[in-house]
Amino acid sequence: MLRASILFLAFVIALGGCSRKEKPPQTSSIRVGLVLSVGGLGDKSFNDSAYRGLMRAKDELKIQPIYGQPEQMAEDEKYLRQYAEQGFDLVIAVGFLMRDALDRVAKEFPNTKFAIIDAVVERPNVASLVFKEHEGSFLVGAIAGLMTKTGKVGFIGGMDIPLIHKFEVGYTEGVHYVNPDADVIVAYAGSGPEAFHDPVRGKSLALSQFDRGADIIFQAAGSTGNGVIDAAQERGLYAIGVDANQNYMAPGHVLTSMLKRVDVAVYEIIKDVVEGKFSGGIHVYGLDVNGVGYALDEYNKDLIPKSVIERIEKIKKDIVAGKIRVTDYTATH
């Protein structure tokens, strides 16, 4: 009798243990294809941010992700069409350079959902994810204007196009809002797509601006901007990062980073598909929804005085409230 009771008790304990076992995480049937901009992963900026959004969706939403890295623009359409032909639930184009290619593929596959970052494609099955880069650039411009000791700051863009002028104009307005007498030195790396992945060129342009008296340079240039950061570290001066938080790349020499939350946009549009809420049209990410901003972390918190942060936060609130109007270059050109 005692032996039977012990066996029964052991069975109950074992059964209880089995009931407490967690089920293995389920993988969603949703498949998402992400086509990166030329230059691919490793830019520590735009592409890497988009990839982080995809990986977050993989971890949190359990989607099945795949990503492609075209080596040249001519391959963009091939990747987009391939994912559409394979029946992916969402195909995302990273960057305005894919606008025409995506427009053609989206027309060909009207029942496939698409998204594109930094461009507008007017088709019902395309979500156009755009940002108010001018607002975030205004904030880092104000930081530069308050922090410059020489009265000269720089801006280095990648490709000389309206989208990057949007960064430049916002930055310049922010500098002059807090420091009307400051000079802003401007340069662009080139007129073609290669201007976004030429760090040697970026460093050369930055060294030239430092030689002309600039002590802070904001770069909006993809991996070309990594050369700007290298130059700032070499000269003991400051760079301002872009898109992703680049403060860690040269601690003590990246004053802050203008955050453009491409990762959030990618994650949110995937989430919409998973939840059956996808909608085409324009989706805008500005200061009001933390779609843009500036980075403050352990790498730069001791570089920027509390009084400057307080001023910037007041400016941020005024932009959101409409008390400060920042020029959107692309809306006027």
Image (cartoon, rainbow, N blue to C red):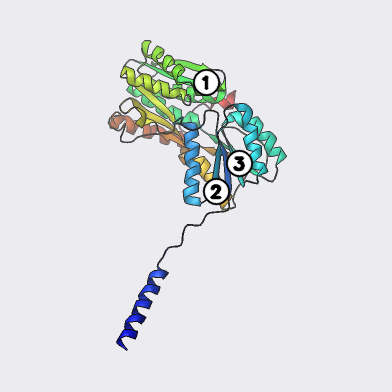
Residue 154 vertical placement versus 87 (above, below): above
Residue farthest toward the bottom in the current orientation of the protein: 1
Image side of residue 277 versus residue 201, left or right: right
Identify the residue shown where x is 48% and y is 44%. Answer: 55
Cα–Cα span, label 2 and label 1 = 33 Å
The residue at which mark 3 appears reads as: 91
Residue 286 in view here: no
Q: Pointer 2 and pointer 1: residues touching (CB < 8 Å)? A: no
Q: Pointer 3 and pointer 1: residues touching (CB < 8 Å)? A: no
Q: Quadrant of the N terminus?
A: bottom left
Amino acid type for the residue under numbered disc 2: Gln
The residue at which mark 1 appears reads as: 195
Amino acid type for the residue under numbered disc 1: Ala
Question: Dot 2, crowdedness within 10 Å: few (<14), some or many (≥20)?
Answer: some
Nearer-the-camera pick, 253 or 165: 253
Question: Dot 1, crowdedness within 10 Å: few (<14), some or many (≥20)?
Answer: many
Q: What is the x, y in percent for residue 122?
A: 66, 36
| Mark 3 or mark 1: whose residue is earlier in sequence | 3
Residue 189 in view here: yes
Residue 126, quarter of the rendered image: top right
Q: What is the x, y in percent for residue 56?
A: 47, 45
Cα–Cα span, label 3 and label 2 = 12 Å
- The image shows a total of numbered marks equal to 3
Q: Which mark is residue 107?
A: none
Image side of residue 50 versus residue 93, left or right: left
Q: Nearer the viewer, mark 2 or mark 1?
A: 2
Residue farthest toward the top in the current orientation of the protein: 212
The residue at which mark 2 appears reads as: 64
Amino acid type for the residue under numbered disc 3: Val
